[in-house]
């Protein structure tokens, strides 16, 4: 009796499909139990996908969904994030400023851009309505200390007061308790980072793009530096207390949008962070 070739092919295809499914299923639990930093494993998990898809046309059994590439474990400190898309985070420090912060909020609203504001606690206490507007318009509000000292030079008690009073002022004005903070001048050490992470639940946010807008009060310089140095996952530093910085924003934001960049808050960018080779890193983080 002759067995039609089509039947042999169909049988072999189905058999191969089940072998692939069984191999894939038996691998999955082992990988789920591996410790964090699973960059190499992530590639292995994704690899079987094309084989299963090519077989699914002949096999009625639904293919198992491959595990998504896992998010990176939350880090103590971020200079930038490793993301799959052209997303950046604009960050503005040292406000709220009574005139310039509202002007910036108008510019951001016109462009439907969300940013992160690292605010000074005593300025929030002075201008709570502006802090509230920051949150009401979908931006992230974050801790930048009460009085902008170098935190590394403070006693443990004074350090705690800088963080706690600012968190309380922000919460009173907006109802939001911050989850990220930026140390003034970027001055930080491992002991303070650990305290911020563990006692206050705050990740330390530095930056990967710095136009030095506090020093070079020239809007063309600020916008061109940002446009030139932006990269996927970048955290861009600016200050909403200088008129030249606000004047730089229309050109900088419009150019980034026309280059295909989208904007996320810092916490949104962190949620997109992936444990793979960094695409945008600060010079400090490069070995
Ligand atoms: Zn500052």
Image (spheres, helix red, strand yellow):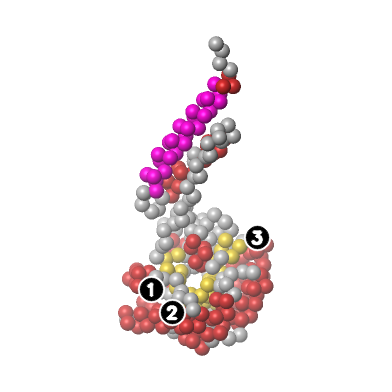
Q: Position of residue 91 (x, y in %)?
A: 54, 71
Where does the magenta region start and end?
8-32
Mark 2 close to ligand 1, CB under 8 Å:
no
In the rendered view, does 33 fall on the left or right side of 5?
A: left
Instruction: Give whichever of discs 2 and 1 has the lower sequence position.
Output: 2
* Label 2 with label 3: CB-CB less than 8 Å: no
Quarter occupied by the C terminus: bottom left
Above or below — where is 35 with respect to 57? below
Instruction: Give whichever of discs 2 and 3 has the lower sequence position.
Output: 2
Disc 2 on helix, strand or loop? helix
Q: Camera-side residue: 37 or 245?
A: 37
Can residue 227 be seen from the camera position used here? yes
The total number of labels drawn is 3
Pointer 2: what residue?
Answer: 167
Magenta-drawn stretch, dominant element (helix, strand or loop): helix
Which numbered dot is residue 30? none
Between circles 3 and 1, the one closer to the viewer is 1
**Residue at 45 percent of width and 32 percent of height:** 19
Instruction: Give whichever of discs 3 and 1 has the lower sequence position.
Output: 1
In the rendered view, does 121 fall on the left or right side of 249?
A: left
Q: Position of residue 131 (x, y in %)?
A: 54, 81
- Residue 221, located in which quarter of the rendered image? bottom right
Q: Position of residue 12 (x, y in %)?
A: 51, 25
Magenta region includes residue 35: no
Which numbered dot is residue 200? 1
Spatial CA span between label 3 and label 1: 37 Å
* Label 2 with label 1: CB-CB less than 8 Å: yes
């Amino acid at each position: 009796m002759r067995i039609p070739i089509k039947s042999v092919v169909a049988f072999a295809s189905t058999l191969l499909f089940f072998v692939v499914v069984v191999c894939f299923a038996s691998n999955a639990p082992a990988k789920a139990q591996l410790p964090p930093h699973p960059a190499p494993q992530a590639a292995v998990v994704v690899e079987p996908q094309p084989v299963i898809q090519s077989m699914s046309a002949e096999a009625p059994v639904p293919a198992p969904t491959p595990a998504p590439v896992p998010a990176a474990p939350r880090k103590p400190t971020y200079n930038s994030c490793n993301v799959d898309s052209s997303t950046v985070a604009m960050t503005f420090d040292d406000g709220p400023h009574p005139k310039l912060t509202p002007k910036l909020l108008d510019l951001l609203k016109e462009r439907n851009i969300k940013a992160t504001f690292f605010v000074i606690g005593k300025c929030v206490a002075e201008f709570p309505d502006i802090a509230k507007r920051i949150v009401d318009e979908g931006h992230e509000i974050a801790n930048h200390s009460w009085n902008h000292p170098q935190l590394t030079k403070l006693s443990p008690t004074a350090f705690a007061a800088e963080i706690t009073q600012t968190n309380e002022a922000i919460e009173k004005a907006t109802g939001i308790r911050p989850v990220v903070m930026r140390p003034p001048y970027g001055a930080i050490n491992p002991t303070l980072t650990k305290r911020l992470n563990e006692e206050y639940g705050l990740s330390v946010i530095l930056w990967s793009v710095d136009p030095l807008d506090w020093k070079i009060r020239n809007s063309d310089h600020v916008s061109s530096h940002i446009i030139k140095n932006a990269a996927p996952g970048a955290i861009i530093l600016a200050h909403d207390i200088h008129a030249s910085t606000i004047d730089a924003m229309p050109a900088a934001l419009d150019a980034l949008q026309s280059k295909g960049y989208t904007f996320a808050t810092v916490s949104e960018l962190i949620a997109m962070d992936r444990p793979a080779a960094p695409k945008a890193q600060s010079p400090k983080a490069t070995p």
